């Protein structure tokens, strides 16, 4: 109605179709429904942002080989030394990040549906203030879609985006959260008022026949010419809830590992990892990393460098050193993780001492694999944890070539990607 009055006053007529408010006739659109989805996103996106920042810190992005994002500058000012304890923490924070991101997709789509008439506001620019608001909404919606899409593509291994995923998703996250914080600040009073305007309990008891539009609102979310309801608000909430629940049920198994892995029908890499001591999820096989032959060559030796000394050890020489066993999971940035496996090998801190650097700042790890994940760094606190190993065996058997034979890194609470397989050289930095 407000728009009609405006049109009458200015004599302006919107182009036909979606630019006319009468085009949008769903009787369900209104501030209450939008605010329900908004509240869910407010809580969810806050958790996504926090767990995302934690994941970036866990990567130790300032160490050699860990992150190709140049100059994270101010955005990296919060970085801290990610701890090695509890050993399951990254499993939980990153499993939550990925699972919650998936579960929120139906909520995000529903929220966008509920406000879509605003996209076609006519005239597109009325006042400078409104122009600024619309530009900020572009960043908000664009940022949200960008973050969800890049996250989704990454966990599906569909690297169609240009450049590094970390760079895009990290900077995109900051753009999105900036616009999100501004939007929340502006809309919080409206949201609170709208949520108080109706009772959720009553809505959940209202069927389609009794579904009435919300009263006209100053933001023009309510249709000026609502059609008869063909679905209730309860029905819409149920549909979105069922969508989220289905995504949850078909994905959560990848974060639980073990038996539950088989229920994660939507997760990629559902391939059978086989049985026996090495029968747990494999990220990249030796074949796909191109190391099948080099990893099984008996001339393999581990090079140990530190300070100004250097030496090398054969696998038998490593096995002759004191061995340590630790139960540790592998938790990938993509959200999947394994139950703890029992790893045996030489503690990294013993190797550091052997190399002559008893309290290193970091260690640079290189492997037979010349791909992006072939060389990474661990921080001093990770090297010095007694459970951080150069593992030679898992669950009582030699490592399989797919799990990193002849030797791999395994560190508690470490993003999976830094548990480098097929290690050839360790350089301890003073
Ligand atoms: N050399 C090398 N090490 C690697 C990788 C790799 O591609 N090359 N992938 C990493 C990633 S992303 C993960 S999640 C873990 C998975 O270990 P797994 O395959 O034994 O489960 O290995 C890490 N180690
Ligand atoms: Mo990974």
Image (spheres, rainbow, N blue to C red):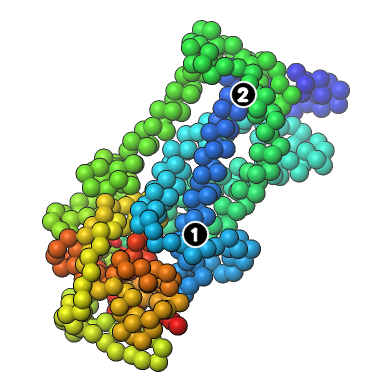
**Is label 2's Cβ within 8 Å of ligand 2?**
no
Q: Residue at x 71, y 44 (%)?
A: 135
Q: Give how far across and how far down residue 211 sits, in percent.
A: 55, 11
Per the image, label 2 sits on a secondary structure element best described as helix
Per the image, label 1 sits on a secondary structure element best described as helix
Give the left or right position of residue 78, taking residue 334 as reference: right
Q: Give how far across and how far down residue 395 sits, in percent.
A: 17, 60
> In front: 97, or 211?
97
Mark 1 vs 2, N-terminal side: 1
Q: Residue at x 49, y 55 (%)?
A: 54
Pointer 1: what residue? Answer: 56
Give the left or right position of residue 386, taking residue 93 as reference: left
Numbered label attached to residue 142: none
How many discs appear? 2
Q: Is residue 83 visible?
A: yes
Give the left or right position of residue 323, taking residue 224 as reference: left
> In front: 224, or 308?
308
Q: Using a 10 Å C-alpha cutoff, classify the residue at mark 1 as few (fewer than 14 neighbours), some (14 to 19) or many (20 or more).
A: some
Q: Which part of the image, by quadrant, shows the N terminus? A: top right
Q: Give how far across and how far down residue 94 sits, in percent.
A: 42, 51
Q: Is residue 401 above or below residue 33?
A: below
The image quadrant that residue 390 belongs to is bottom left
Pointer 2: what residue? Answer: 195
């Amino acid at each position: 109605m407000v728009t009609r009055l405006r049109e009458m006053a200015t004599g302006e007529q919107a182009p036909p179709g979606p630019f006319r408010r009468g085009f949008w006739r769903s009787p369900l659109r209104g501030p209450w429904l939008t605010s329900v989805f908004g509240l869910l996103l407010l809580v969810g996106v806050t958790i996504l942002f926090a767990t995302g920042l934690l994941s970036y810190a866990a990567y130790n992005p300032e160490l050699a080989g860990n992150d190709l994002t140049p100059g994270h500058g101010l955005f990296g000012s919060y970085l801290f030394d990610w701890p090695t304890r509890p050993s399951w923490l990254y499993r939980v924070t990153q499993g939550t990040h990925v699972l919650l991101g998936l579960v929120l997709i139906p909520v995000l789509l529903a929220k966008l549906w509920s406000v879509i008439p605003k996209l076609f506001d006519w005239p597109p620019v009325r006042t400078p203030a409104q122009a600024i608001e619309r530009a900020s909404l572009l960043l908000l919606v664009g940022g949200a879609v960008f973050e969800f899409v890049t996250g989704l593509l990454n966990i599906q291994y569909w690297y169609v985006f240009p450049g590094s995923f970390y760079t895009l998703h990290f900077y995109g996250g900051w753009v999105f959260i900036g616009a999100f914080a501004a939007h929340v600040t502006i809309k919080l009073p409206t949201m609170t008022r709208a949520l108080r305007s109706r009772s959720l309990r009553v809505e959940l008891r209202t069927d389609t026949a009794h579904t009435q539009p919300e009263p006209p609102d100053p933001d023009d979310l309510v249709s000026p010419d609502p059609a008869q309801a063909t679905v209730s608000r309860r029905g819409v909430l149920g549909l979105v809830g069922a969508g989220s629940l289905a995504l949850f049920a078909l994905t959560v198994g990848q974060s639980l590992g073990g038996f539950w892995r088989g229920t994660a029908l939507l997760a990629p890499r559902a391939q059978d990892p086989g049985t026996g001591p090495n029968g747990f999820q494999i990220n990249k096989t030796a074949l796909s990393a191109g190391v099948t032959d080099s990893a099984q060559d008996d001339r393999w030796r581990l090079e140990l460098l530190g300070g100004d000394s250097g030496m090398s050890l054969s696998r038998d020489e490593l096995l002759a050193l004191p061995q340590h066993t630790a139960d540790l999971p592998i938790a990938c940035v993509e959200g999947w993780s394994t139950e703890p496996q029992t790893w045996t090998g030489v503690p990294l801190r013993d190797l550091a001492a052997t190399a002559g650097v008893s309290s290193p700042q970091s260690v640079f790890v290189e492997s037979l694999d010349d791909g992006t994940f072939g060389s990474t760094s661990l921080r001093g606190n990770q090297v010095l944890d007694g459970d951080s190993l150069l593992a030679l065996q898992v669950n009582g058997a030699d490592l399989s070539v797919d799990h990193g034979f002849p030797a791999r890194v395994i560190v508690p609470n470490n993003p999976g990607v830094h548990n480098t397989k097929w290690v050839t050289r360790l350089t301890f930095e003073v």
